[in-house]
Image (cartoon, rainbow, N blue to C red):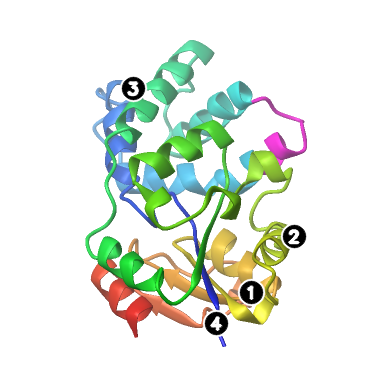
């Protein structure tokens, strides 16, 4: 029996693509072939490697900002940018993230979930930045601070199953009693299933399974209203 529901943050609780595209626009203004959807997907695909590099101490957060952005640009055949330009992009992106809102339907779902389950968050990223998003989304209404784990504070990053196991201990529950809601197959579904959790894949970007699809989500939904229905079923 599921006793707790734990959420990813980025592109699961809110639309992460819109502020990303707005922040990137000045860097790609002269590119007629730029594909914003593909760029967003490529940027997020850099995350697993990038957060692992930061968690292990091999990269600083500044190095992550530069390397992740330039890897994304190069995939579209665009010229890499300087460190200053990458950090300017990061600042603009961060400013856009200060205006984020929950996906439609999630507030209603969270109100009802709070009455039945323990709730938590596991998110990759710098603690200060991720907590700022949590506050902007008013997730503190439903999730206690002790039940929020970031990769920076844990020294672990998704899809490492150990970061999920850490939440087991926080909530004092067995793995089979927890469900994880996330939009990424490679980090959210894979990581939670490896840890023995239930996995709910919020696949609103119509992504495909990677790595052979060895980890099968327990449920898959394609938009926020379907997610609301799933969570309240």
Residue beneath the point at 51% across and 70% down: 209
Mark closer to the chain start, 2 or 4: 4
Q: Position of residue 15 (x, y in %)?
A: 31, 49
The residue that mark 2 highlights is 162
The residue that mark 4 highlights is 2
Q: Which of marks 2 and 4 is in front?
A: 4
Mark closer to the chain start, 4 or 3: 4
Q: Do the CB atoms of the residues marked 1 and 3 lie less than 8 Å apart? A: no
Residue 126, visible in the rendered structure: no
Cα–Cα gap, marks 2 and 1: 12 Å
The residue that mark 3 highlights is 27
User: Where are the magenta residues, as a range?
Assistant: 52-60
Q: Residues within 10 Å of mark 4 (few under 14, many from 20)?
A: some
Q: Position of residue 176 (x, y in %)?
A: 65, 81
Residue beneath the point at 33% across and 80% down: 232
Secondary structure under tag 3 reads helix
Mark closer to the chain start, 2 or 1: 2
Q: Do the CB atoms of the residues marked 4 and 3 lie less than 8 Å apart? A: no
Cα–Cα gap, marks 1 and 4: 14 Å
Q: Position of residue 100 (x, y in %)?
A: 29, 41
Mark closer to the chain start, 3 or 2: 3
Q: In this view, does 162 lie above or below 216?
A: above
Q: Where is residue 165 in the image (x, y as percent from the top left)?
A: 72, 64
């Amino acid at each position: 029996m599921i006793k707790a529901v734990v959420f990813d943050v980025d592109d699961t609780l809110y639309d992460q693509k819109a502020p990303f595209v707005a922040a990137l626009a000045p860097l790609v203004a002269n590119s007629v072939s730029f594909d914003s959807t593909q760029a967003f997907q490529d940027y997020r695909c850099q995350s697993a490697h990038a957060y692992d590099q930061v968690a292990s101490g091999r990269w600083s957060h500044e190095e992550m900002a530069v390397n992740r952005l330039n890897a994304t640009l190069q995939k579209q055949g665009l010229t890499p940018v300087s460190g200053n330009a990458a950090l300017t992009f990061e600042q603009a992106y961060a400013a856009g993230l200060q205006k984020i809102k929950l996906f439609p339907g999630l507030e209603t779902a969270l109100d009802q979930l709070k009455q039945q389950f323990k709730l938590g968050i596991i998110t990759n990223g710098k603690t200060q930045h991720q907590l700022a998003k949590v506050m902007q989304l008013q997730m503190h209404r439903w999730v206690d601070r002790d039940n929020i784990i970031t990769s920076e504070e844990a020294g672990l990053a998704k899809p490492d199953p150990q970061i999920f196991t850490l939440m087991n201990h926080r909530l004092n529950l067995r793995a089979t009693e927890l469900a994880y809601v996330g939009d990424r197959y490679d980090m959210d579904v894979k990581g939670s299933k490896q840890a023995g959790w239930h996995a709910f894949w919020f696949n609103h970007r119509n992504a495909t399974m990677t790595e052979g699809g060895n980890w099968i989500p327990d449920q898959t939904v394609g938009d926020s209203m379907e997610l609301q229905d799933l969570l309240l079923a």
